Image (cartoon, rainbow, N blue to C red):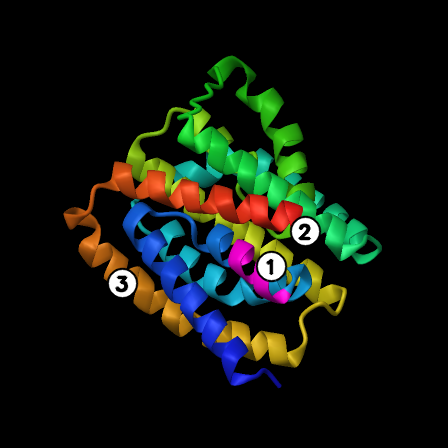
């Protein structure tokens, strides 16, 4: 059983992560994974993120009216990511968690630095079909190893030149698909215990509460400044995980 202190840390983590997702449309898995890895360790963090990520991304993936177009465009990337997640989890089983925690810290720090630098890649339509499978496979392997979905997926989706509403739905679709694949892969390797599953399910409540508050306040906040603060905080957290 989890202590009251641990339950409080998990609830607060998902409340904050849900709020961020409500404001900017992303960040819940990354923030919660980073914070929980720093406090509880990588393996529990990977399992705890699953239920809140699944529920919140169902909403994002099914809202916007671009669902079919997104799936038709991204299916090669998603299929390759599914294979990569399975490969990554197989490596996870036999790899030192401390080493993978450092990899997670490095990924989060890199993601934050590129975001703060306003890194804006571009993928010409002529090479999209060729570049999607290898990038999807890379993202899947990294996801299977660390539980983080963002590198290189977020930058790849931004590089496709989608309109904002379509991009937000595409991110939700990618995060949702990755979460489902991670749940199946981790479950098959017995990484999801009953206690972790119950605590992850309970964490849906603060995550949804934070997300609803974030959505209500999003129009009153400067999204640009909010993102700068978010990525600065993630950079510090990533570096802490990397060097601790």
Is residue 39 highlighted in magenta? yes
- Estimate the x, y position of residue 121 in percent, counting from the top left: 47, 21
Number of residues whose C-alpha sits closer than 10 Å to that of mark 1, classed few (under 14), some (14–19) or many (20 or more): many
Q: Are marks 2 and 1 in contact (CB under 8 Å)?
A: yes
Assign the magenta stretch its main secondary structure: helix
Q: Nearer the viewer, residue 155 or 217?
A: 217
Q: In the image as oriented, which residue stretches furthest toward the left?
A: 220
Query: What's the distance in space between the residues labelled 2 and 1, CA to CA?
Result: 7 Å
Query: What's the distance in space between the residues labelled 3 and 2, CA to CA?
Result: 31 Å
Q: Is residue 187 left or right of residue 230?
A: right
Query: What's the distance in space between the residues labelled 3 and 1, CA to CA?
Result: 25 Å
- Estimate the x, y position of residue 152 in percent, counting from the top left: 56, 34
For residue 111, say whether it is visible: yes
Q: Nearer the viewer, residue 136 or 191?
A: 191
Q: Is residue 167 above or below residue 207?
A: above
Number of residues whose C-alpha sits closer than 10 Å to that of mark 2, classed few (under 14), some (14–19) or many (20 or more): many
Earlier sequence position, callout 2 versus callout 1? 1
- Estimate the x, y position of residue 99 in percent, counting from the top left: 75, 49
Residue carrying label 2: 101
Mark 3 or 1: in front is: 1
Q: Nearer the viewer, residue 122 or 62?
A: 122
Q: Is residue 108 above or below residue 53?
A: above
Q: Is residue 223 above or below residue 160?
A: below
Element under disc 3: helix
Q: In the rendering, which numbered label is found on residue 212?
A: 3
Earlier sequence position, callout 3 versus callout 1? 1
Element under disc 1: helix
In magenta, the rendered stretch is 33-40
Residue carrying label 1: 37
Is residue 38 highlighted in magenta? yes
């Amino acid at each position: 059983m989890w202590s009251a202190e641990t339950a409080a840390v998990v609830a607060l983590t998902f409340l904050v992560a849900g709020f961020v997702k409500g404001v900017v449309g992303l960040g819940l898995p990354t923030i919660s994974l980073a914070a929980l890895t720093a406090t509880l360790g990588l393996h529990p963090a990977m399992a705890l993120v699953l239920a809140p990520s699944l529920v919140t991304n169902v909403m994002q993936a099914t809202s916007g009216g671009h669902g079919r177009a997104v799936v038709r465009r991204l299916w090669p990337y998603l299929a390759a990511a599914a294979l990569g997640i399975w490969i990554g989890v197989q490596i996870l089983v036999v790899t030192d968690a401390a080493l993978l925690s450092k990899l997670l810290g490095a990924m989060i720090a890199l993601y934050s630095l590129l975001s703060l630098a306003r890194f804006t890649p571009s993928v010409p339509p002529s090479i999209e079909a060729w570049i999607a499978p290898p990038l999807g496979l890379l993202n899947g392997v990294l996801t299977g190893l660390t539980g983080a979905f963002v590198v290189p997926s977020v930058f790849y989706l931004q590089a496709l030149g989608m309109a904002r509403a379509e991009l937000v739905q595409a991110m939700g679709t990618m995060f949702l698909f990755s979460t489902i694949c991670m749940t199946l892969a981790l479950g098959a390797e017995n990484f999801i215990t009953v206690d972790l599953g119950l605590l992850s399910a309970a964490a849906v409540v603060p995550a949804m509460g934070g997300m609803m508050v974030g959505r209500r306040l999003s129009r009153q906040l400067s999204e640009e400044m909010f993102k700068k603060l978010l990525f600065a905080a993630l950079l510090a957290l990533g570096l802490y995980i990397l060097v601790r």
